[in-house]
Image (spheres, rainbow, N blue to C red):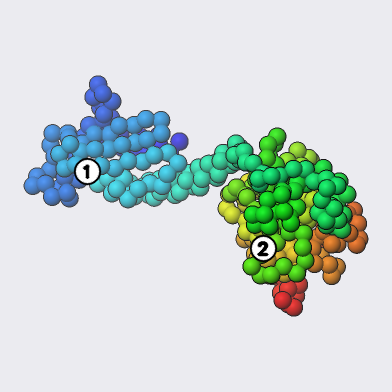
């Protein structure tokens, strides 16, 4: 380990004698540089080493330096090693190794962050209930989009944010509801009325339960939940994929494929694919989104074509992106 190598280099210069409390003492080489009138001759400098940390403190001039395993070698520790006449080649080796260990440590920390992926339990909007024949307009909206199984759609009688004119889709993780989105069922909405009204926790990915528990070669990623339901894939529930979501998705041993809608939001989604080294599939058809394509062409055909047409080359993605969105 690097911490052992640094400790050996230090002990080779100071002799490695220890006090009962575990400090290896030495004449501090920094006192004159710190403004003291004369060099230390009373061994007021001391090193203390554990499995993960090397600490130095001078009880005369007050100089402090430390190195912690998994961190970058600090300037103060480098200055101290130089003052102890540790070979410059060896110091440079320590610098390089500390940078490499920092990168490894960062990767491990990121992976560990998502080994315990969890979301808080949330409630659906007030006055919510499972959709039923009492709401024919809501049922007609779902049937027109190809969803005959309505067992996990909800409605609300509340007037807040036009909830009574929306179909509510619960966001689920494991055995609990952790959020929701409510899609307006009316067409030609004024600009002041959003299509979706949502309660979404950071880092959530729609349909994660389904994808997480299945063996797959590809992970298809769309913008909205209706598209995800149409082909049983993941949805970002927006056009932004944050760092935490990307890190989590990269723990999947699958090829990630972004499937953009043919609009400005879809163009932004492609940018996340190139940033994270994922593939992109630009649909050949003229349908605006996957849900419409499935209605017209069928789920099996749509998924087959998305996989066949995927592109992983960043250069090709940029070229096709410009063509695909040129009419926007």
Q: Secondary structure at mark 2?
A: loop
- Between 152 and 220, the one lying in front of the other is 152
Name the residue rendered at 34%, 36% in the picture: 54
Judge left or right: residue 289 versus residue 174: right
Residue 146's x, y, as percent? 87, 55
Residue 254 shows in the view? no
Name the residue rendered at 77%, 63% in the picture: 186
Name the residue rendered at 20%, 45% in the picture: 30
Q: Residues within 10 Å of mark 1 (few under 14, many from 20)?
A: some
Q: Is residue 324 above or below residue 35?
A: below
Judge left or right: residue 97 versus residue 173: left
Residue identifier under label 1? 63
In the picture, the quarter occupied by the N terminus is top left
Residue 305's x, y, as percent? 86, 59
Q: Report which quarter residue 290 is drawn in.
A: bottom right
Name the residue rendered at 73%, 73% in the picture: 325
The residues bearing labels 2 and 1 have C-alpha atoms spaced at a distance of 60 Å
Q: Secondary structure at mark 1?
A: loop
- Between 268 and 201, the one lying in front of the other is 201
Residue 184 shows which numbered tag? none
Q: Report which quarter residue 5 is drawn in.
A: top left
Q: Is residue 317 above or below residue 213?
A: below
Residue 168's x, y, as percent? 73, 50
Residue identifier under label 2? 194
Judge left or right: residue 197 versus residue 217: left
Q: Nearer the viewer, mark 2 or mark 1?
A: 2
């Amino acid at each position: 380990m690097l911490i052992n190598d640094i400790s050996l280099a230090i002990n080779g210069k100071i002799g490695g004698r220890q006090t009962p409390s575990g400090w290896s003492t030495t004449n501090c080489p920094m006192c004159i540089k710190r403004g003291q009138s004369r060099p230390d001759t009373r061994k007021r400098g001391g090193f203390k080493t554990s499995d993960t940390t090397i600490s130095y403190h001078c009880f005369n001039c007050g100089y402090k330096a430390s190195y912690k395993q998994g961190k970058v070698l600090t300037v103060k520790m480098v200055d101290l090693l130089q003052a102890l006449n540790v070979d410059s080649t060896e110091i440079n080796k320590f610098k390089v190794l500390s940078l490499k260990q920092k990168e490894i440590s960062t990767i491990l920390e990121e992976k560990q962050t998502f080994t315990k992926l969890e979301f808080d339990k949330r409630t659906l909007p007030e006055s919510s209930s499972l959709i039923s024949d009492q709401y024919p307009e809501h049922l007609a909206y779902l049937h027109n989009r190809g969803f005959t199984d309505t067992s996990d759609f909800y409605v609300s009688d509340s007037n807040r944010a036009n909830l009574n004119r929306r179909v509510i889709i619960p966001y689920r993780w494991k055995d609990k509801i952790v959020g929701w989105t409510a899609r307006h069922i009316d067409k030609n909405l004024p600009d002041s009325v959003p299509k979706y009204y949502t309660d979404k926790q950071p880092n959530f990915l729609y349909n994660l339960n389904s994808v997480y528990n299945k063996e797959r070669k590809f992970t298809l990623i769309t913008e909205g939940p209706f598209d995800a339901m149409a082909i049983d894939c993941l949805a970002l529930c927006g056009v932004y994929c944050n760092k935490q979501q990307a890190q989590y998705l990269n723990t999947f041993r699958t090829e990630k494929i972004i499937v953009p809608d043919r609009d400005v939001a879809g163009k932004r989604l492609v940018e996340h694919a190139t940033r994270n080294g994922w593939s992109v599939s630009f649909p050949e058809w003229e349908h605006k989104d996957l849900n419409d394509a499935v209605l017209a062409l069928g789920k099996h055909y749509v998924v087959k074509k998305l996989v066949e047409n995927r592109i992983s080359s960043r250069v090709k993605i940029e070229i096709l992106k410009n063509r695909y969105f040129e009419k926007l």
